[in-house]
Image: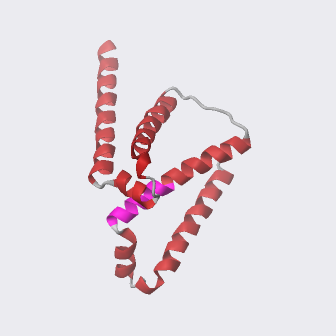
Amino acid sequence: MMLLYLFVIVMGLGWGLAVGSGLVAFLSVLDIIPRLTQLSSSHSFTRSYEWAIVLGALWFTWCDYLAISVQLPAVLTAVVGSFAGIFVGMLAAGLTEVLNVFPILTKRLGLHDYMRNFLMAMVLGKIVGSLLQWTFSL
């Protein structure tokens, strides 16, 4: 039985290292953080962005592992959720900027003249989808 527990621990650590290494490689090879700081004109906060990602990943992994949940007042939850959403949105913006996703996608779909409408549809769709999920999954 002890051998089974040891096996599970080694496998869990191995998979965690593999996923973590993939995330670090993804963020560093594509220069997501520098592009994010360039988009937001916050070059002096580059280390803060990096530490926010690392500490956030560690903290929420630990909370998930221990099944920790925090009950906050609705107003505070909305503020924390807004900051988390802004950060994830900025990270996604940095990623799409690095990969030139929108110009390639609109060119291939033949929607190059409708780029602004395409972006607004994506943004509004994300907002509506997030609000619906947040509203109905409580």
Q: How is the image coloured?
A: secondary structure
Q: Is residue 107 left or right of residue 115?
A: left
Residue extending furthest front? 44
Q: Is residue 118 visible?
A: yes
Residue 138 visible (yes or no):
no
Q: Residue at x 38, y 65 (%)?
A: 97
Q: How many marks?
A: 0
Image: 89 above or below 51 = below
Magenta stretch prevailing secondary structure? helix
Magenta extent? 89-99
82 magenta-colored: no
**Front-most of 36 and 99?**
36
Say which quadrant the N terminus sits in: top left
Above or below for 6 versus 35 = above
Question: Please, which residue is most extreme toward the top here?
Answer: 2
- Viewer-proximal residue, 28 or 118? 28
Instruction: Tell me if residue 94 is in the magenta stretch.
Output: yes
Q: How far across and how far down the image is residue 6, in percent?
A: 31, 18
Rendered view: 128 above or below 48: below
- The picture places residue 117, in percent across and down from the top left corner, at 52, 79
Front one among 97 and 39? 39
Residue 20 drawn at (x, y percent): 33, 39
Against 128, residue 114 (above or below) is: below
Name the residue rendered at 54%, 73% in the picture.
120
* Occupied quadrant, residue 15: top left
Q: What residue lies at 44% left-to-right and 38% top-to-bottom?
A: 57
